[in-house]
Image (spheres, rainbow, N blue to C red):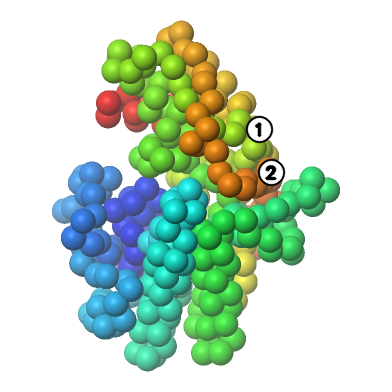
Amino acid sequence: MKALITGISGFVGSHLAEYLLKNNTEVYGTIRHRSRMNHIQHLLNDINLVECELRDPFSVENLIQDVKPDLIFHLAAQSFVPTSWNSPIDTIHNNVAGQVNIFEAVRRLDLNCKIQIACSSEEYGYVDPTEVPITELNPIRPLSPYAISKVAQDYLGYQYYKSYGLHVVCTRTFNHTGPRRGENFVTSNFAKQIAEIEKGLKAPVLYVGNLQAQRDFTDVRDVVHAYWLALEKGDPGEVYNIASGSCCTIQEMLNLLLSLSTAQIEVKEDPSRLRPSDVEILLGDYSKFHAKTGWKPQIPFTQTMEDLLNYWRAIV
């Protein structure tokens, strides 16, 4: 079994590579010349890396033709919501063009493979409090350029399934975190600030944005197991929520992290961390996916946060 992971050097990609290797899968992954390799340094002897610019159709077709994967996990994307406000067209082009090129290559080569598309709960956007927990039937009301790009990826997956019979399964993953999470993301940013304060590398002030937003967090190690099951047991053309089924405010998440440290830390709001518009609540219903695959999250949120904080303690 050959699996191709786009964006293998990223947060989720590195954890997925570890998971696939444990399941006796031959792992290939795309990188770019500027990709940071720190997340996969320990895997370099066990995986096959291919340099590929996913926005270039010829590069993608050569990749697919050479590897001929049985499974494609399409994770590569511009995935940071605030960046999408600064570079909306780049985000949309990057996220949509890469996927179209993969689909076109698989279609033209008539390759028999399964494709998982890593989409996002951000697609749901504005959610009325009466509409939670969010099922796959909730209205799509995106509130950021990033969310728009993910809606496009989502619908392209359905279109290529209906038009060409491609085996595409779309996962709408709610917030996920854990060791190696990029420091731009809220859980990791707070954990890194705490680790720096503990080591005396910064003043004992932790800067925050909107603490009232409510988010559904799942451990990345549970998420990559879900991605595997999406292709093993999921139906092509279908969309599945990947979530924990519970949520907390960003304030509650911060309080948990602070409780794991003995440092005396002051919390201050930083206006630059506030978004033009923010999704108030994201609480996912993963019952459709559970019914199809038996998946449910296994790792407690407290353990996730402790592992994340310890990751940053080892890094800073």
Which residue is identified by label 2? Answer: 281
Q: Residues within 10 Å of mark 2 (few under 14, many from 20)?
A: many
Asked if residue 70 can be seen in this view, the reply is: no
* Rendering coords of residue 56 (x, y %): 29, 77
Dot 1 or dot 2: first in sequence order is 1
Q: Which quadrant holds the N terminus?
A: bottom left
Q: Is residue 316 left or right of residue 240?
A: left
Asked if residue 85 can be seen in this view, the reply is: yes
Q: Secondary structure at mark 1?
A: loop
* Rendering coords of residue 172 (x, y %): 58, 59
Q: Residue at x 29, y 53 (%)?
A: 9
Which residue, as the protein is rendered here, is positioned at the far left? 45
Q: Residue at x 53, y 87 (%)?
A: 165
Q: Residues within 10 Å of mark 1 (few under 14, many from 20)?
A: few
Q: Which mark is residue 212?
A: 1
- Hey, what amino acid is under mark 1? Gln
- Hey, what amino acid is under mark 2? Ile
Q: Secondary structure at mark 2?
A: loop
* Rendering coords of residue 15 (x, y %): 37, 48
Viewer-side residue, 84 vs 247: 84
Q: Quadrant of residue 169?
A: bottom right
Q: Is residue 111 left or right of residue 213?
A: left
Q: Which quadrant holds the C terminus?
A: top left
Asked if 137 appears above or below 316 in the picture, the reply is below
Q: Is residue 201 left or right of residue 264?
A: left
Mark 1 to mark 2 CA distance (whole Å) = 9 Å
* Rendering coords of residue 145 (x, y %): 53, 60
Asked if 94 appears above or below 143 in the picture, the reply is below
Q: Residue at x 42, y 70 (%)?
A: 93
